[in-house]
Amino acid sequence: AAPAAPAQEPPAPGRGRKVRTYAGMAAAAVTTALAVVVAVQMAGDGDPGSSAAPSAAGGAQKRAEAGTSAASRSDGRGTPAASAAPAAPAVELSYEQKMAQQFPIDEKLKGSGTFDTVPGVAPAPGKGKKVRYRVDVEQGLGLDAQLFAEAVHRTLNDDRSWGHGGTKTFERVPGGEADFVITLASPGTTGVWCAKSDLDTTVDNVSCDSASTERVMINAFRWAQGSTTYGADQMFAYRQMLINHEVGHRLGHGHVNCQTPGALAPIMQQQTKSLDIGGIQCKPNPWVFPGS
């Protein structure tokens, strides 16, 4: 009889179970890895708000080519507010426009009594006798010193003023060689300087030529607000009259009243106070030679 086949050696206790356990673990690991890959791919192609990165360069390239990357998508994003339009630049007023305006000021203002000289030289434009003057403006008035200085220079060198016919020409200087100082000052300071020449400007709040001093005093209240005789619509003309009248005193001219009803008032009439003197009503006039 053929010999019997040898019996297989039974596996060592527990060995088969270990092999099966390892195989099961390997399969589970593979399954888990596949699940992770699928999940990453789904996350990369899904909600733009997701923080997961794409797993393949191809997916990112497609999104870039399609213009739908997370950074460029606008779904759900607010529209940026439009920036405010730039403000239109302020329109610079002309000399004439500024001179026609009234400016705010307290009629009882008393300033510091300290003056600033308007710097620079405004050359005399004519060929007559040169008259040099300085312009001082009291500190703290809140008024345009350059406008005041320009008004003085333009007014005095107008042919209708004291240099008519080339007899005089006026030059603004910043130093001590001035023949007189045209001074814009508060009502209180104007009163102080006018009193030095025995003039009382406080009653009607007016200006003066303080003849015993170097100063021709222009009352800042009158410069800013004018007078009832001229009205708010004639501020330009009133300021020209104010300059011509007070400088006229410095040049040696006294007061003169109108003699003909309805005529232009003489420049040396006290036009701030009244245009009706002794029952003779005259018209406002800012010039020495108004018909020129």
Image: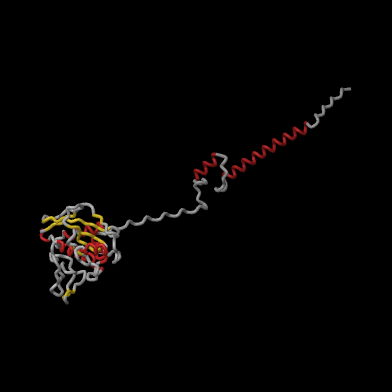
How many numbered circles are shown?
0
Which of 144/200 is in front? 200
- Residue 244 image-quadrant placement: bottom left
Image point (72%, 36%), residue name = 24
Q: Residue at x 22, y 67 (%)?
A: 200
Specify the farthest residue to the bottom: 279
**Quadrant holding the N terminus:** top right
Relative horizontal placement of residue 163, taking residue 28 as reference (left or right): left
Viewer-proximal residue, 23 or 122?
A: 122
Name the residue: 56% across, 42% down.
54
Q: Name the side, left or right, on which 42 lies relative to 102.
A: right
**Residue at image location 13% in from the left, 73% down from the top:** 259
**Most extreme residue toward the right, as rendered?**
1
Colouring mode (rainbow / by chain / secondary structure / one colour): secondary structure
State which quadrant residue 34 falls in: top right
Asked whether the viewer can see residue 131, the reply is yes
Tell which of 283 and 292 is nearer to you.
283
Q: Is residue 91 left or right of residue 153?
A: right
Residue 134 vertical position relative to residue 19 in the rendered view, above or below = below
Where does residue 156 sit, x and y in percent of width and height?
A: 17, 60
Residue 87: give x, y in percent of width and height: 36, 56
Image location of residue 273, percent across then percent down: 21, 70
The quadrant in which the C terminus is found is bottom left
Q: Position of residue 223 (x, y in %)?
A: 24, 64
Residue 53 occupies which quadrant of the picture?
top right
Question: Would residue 97 be seen by someone viewing this image from the given angle?
Answer: no
